[in-house]
Image (cartoon, rainbow, N blue to C red):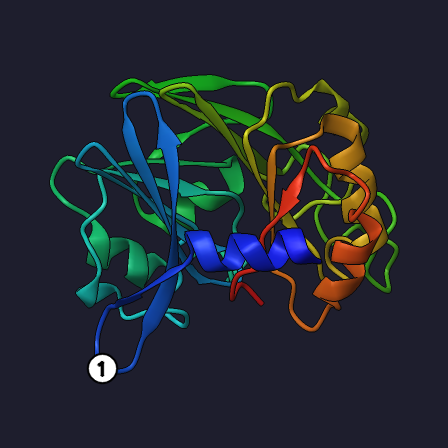
C-alpha cells in the first residue's frame, strides 16, 4: 500500500478544464518528451505528446468537449454508447483529424478509418496496433457475450520508447499473453461487462506491465485489486478517478 500512496503523491496533478470539471493528469517520461495522460472518466482518456492530442473513446457525458483540445488522432475501441459519442467526436474534430475505429463503430462515428484485430497503422510516428477485446465468461441473458470476439478493439500505442495498452472492454483473454514490453496498461474492471479484480490481476500476470491503471471500474473494489497485486513489485498500480 505504501508504494501506491507514494505514486499518488508523485504523479498526480489536477488540471482545471472549466468551472464544472477538473481531471487528474499524469506524466510519463519518454526519451522524446513527456506523455501527458488526462483521466477524463470511465473508459475515456486524452493523451498529449509533442504537440499531438490523442482522444480515446471521447464521450460527452464525462466532459465538456468544447473546453478540451481538438484532436489530431481519435481512437474508438467499440460502438457502445459509453465509448462512442458522435457529437463529442464532431466537437473535437479538426479538418485533418484522423480517426481509427473497429468496423461496427464506423457508421456511428461519421468518418474515420477501420482497423481490425491484428492490424496495424501509423500516425505521425506513433505505431497503432489493434488487439482483441472480448468476453469469454460474462454474457447477456440470451447467452451472447457482452463483447463478442472479433468485434471490439484494444489498442497498443508505441509512443517514442513507451508502449501503452488501452484494453477497451475485455476480459483476461488468452491473446494478452502475446503482449510484450508494455510500459503502461489500462485494464477495465466492472461486472458484468468486463473483469473482476481477480481477472485483472490474472491479466497483469500474463504480460507484466510496469504501470497499471484500472479504468472503467464502476463500483468495483479497487483496494481488492491493490491487495491482489501487492507482492508483484514489477507492476505499480495507480488508482485514478476512472469509475
Could one spot residue 110 in this view of the protein?
A: yes
| Neighbour tally class for label 1: few under 14, some 14-19, many 20 plus, Cα within 10 Å | few
Residue furthest left in the image: 95
Q: From the viewer's side, name the closer residue of 92 and 39.
A: 39
Image point 78% across, 49% down: which residue? 230
Could one spot residue 138 in this view of the protein?
A: no
Q: From the viewer's side, name the closer residue of 228 and 60.
A: 228
Choose top left, top right, bottom left or bottom right for residue 212.
top right
Q: Secondary structure at mark 1?
A: loop
Image point 63% across, 43% down: which residue? 236
The answer to whether residue 211 is above or below residue 33 is below
Residue for badge 1: 19
* Residue 85 left/right relative to 230: left
- Can you give x and y, in whole percent of width and height, for residue 7 in the image? 53, 52
Quarter that holds the C terminus: bottom right
- Can you give x and y, in whole percent of width and height, for residue 56 in the image? 41, 47
- Can you give x and y, in whole percent of width and height, for residue 61 in the image? 40, 72
Amino acid at each position: 500500500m505504501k508504494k501506491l500512496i507514494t505514486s499518488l503523491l508523485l504523479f498526480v496533478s489536477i488540471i482545471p478544464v472549466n468551472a464544472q470539471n477538473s481531471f487528474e493528469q499524469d506524466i510519463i517520461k519518454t526519451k522524446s518528451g513527456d506523455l501527458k495522460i488526462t483521466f477524463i472518466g470511465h473508459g475515456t482518456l486524452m493523451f498529449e505528446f509533442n504537440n499531438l492530442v490523442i482522444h480515446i473513446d471521447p464521450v460527452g457525458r464525462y466532459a465538456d468537449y468544447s473546453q478540451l483540445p481538438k484532436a489530431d488522432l481519435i481512437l474508438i475501441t467499440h460502438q457502445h454508447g459509453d465509448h462512442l459519442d458522435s457529437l463529442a467526436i464532431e466537437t473535437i474534430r479538426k479538418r485533418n483529424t484522423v480517426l481509427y475505429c473497429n468496423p461496427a463503430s464506423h457508421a456511428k462515428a461519421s468518418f474515420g478509418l477501420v482497423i481490425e484485430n491484428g492490424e496495424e497503422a501509423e500516425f505521425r510516428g506513433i505505431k497503432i496496433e489493434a488487439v482483441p477485446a472480448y468476453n469469454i465468461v460474462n454474457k447477456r441473458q440470451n447467452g451472447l457475450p457482452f463483447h463478442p470476439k472479433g468485434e471490439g478493439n484494444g489498442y497498443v500505442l508505441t509512443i517514442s520508447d513507451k508502449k501503452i495498452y488501452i484494453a477497451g472492454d475485455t476480459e483476461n483473454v488468452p491473446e494478452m499473453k502475446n503482449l510484450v514490453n508494455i510500459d503502461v496498461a489500462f485494464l477495465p474492471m466492472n461486472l458484468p461487462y468486463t473483469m473482476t479484480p481477480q481477472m485483472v490481476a490474472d491479466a497483469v500476470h500474463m504480460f507484466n506491465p510496469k504501470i497499471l491503471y484500472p479504468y472503467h471500474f464502476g463500483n468495483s473494489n479497487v483496494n481488492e485489486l491493490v491487495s491482489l497485486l501487492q507482492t508483484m513489485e514489477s507492476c505499480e498500480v495507480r488508482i485514478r478517478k476512472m469509475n
